[in-house]
Image (spheres, grey):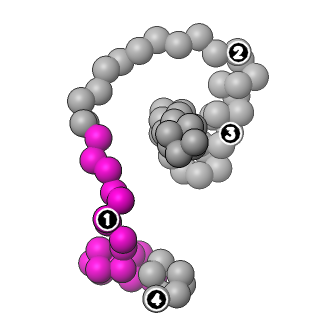
Amino acid sequence: MKAEEFDRKFDDGENITQALDLSKAKRYQSEQKTISIDLPVWMLERIDQEASRLGVTPQTIIQTSLAEHLAINEAQ
């Protein structure tokens, strides 16, 4: 299936799980813990800009960035 067809089916709400390779999918515990972190103002501004551009929350940007970083390090 080409990416355009996959995207269309997803956007239309169709079930696309048959097109996914779930053999290496991982399910992490969904328990969450709130933390406090100090970041420089310039970094927060960039996170806010990126979140606005993508239409997501700043928390999503931070979580995604951390998850990607951890996945890269896990693969090494």
| Tag 3 residue | 49
Q: Name the residue under label 4.
A: 1
Q: What residue type is labelled 4?
A: Met
- What is the distance, in whole Å, between disc 1 and disc 2 at their CAs? 40 Å
Task: For the residues labelled 4 and 2, say whether their Cβ atoms are less than 8 Å apart.
Answer: no
Against 32, residue 21 (above or below) is below
- The image quarter containing residue 72 is top right
User: Which comes before the other along the chain, label 1 or label 4?
Assistant: 4
Q: Main secondary structure of the magenta part?
A: loop
At label 1, the amino acid type is Ser
Q: In the image, residue 25 lies at what x, y percent?
A: 33, 57
In the rendered structure, does residue 14 fall within the stretch colored magenta?
yes
Q: What element carries label 2?
A: loop
| N-term mark: 4 or 2 | 4
| Number of numbered markers | 4
Q: Name the residue under label 1.
A: 23
Q: Relative to 25, does residue 61 appear above or below in the rendering?
A: above
Magenta stretch: give its range: 8-28
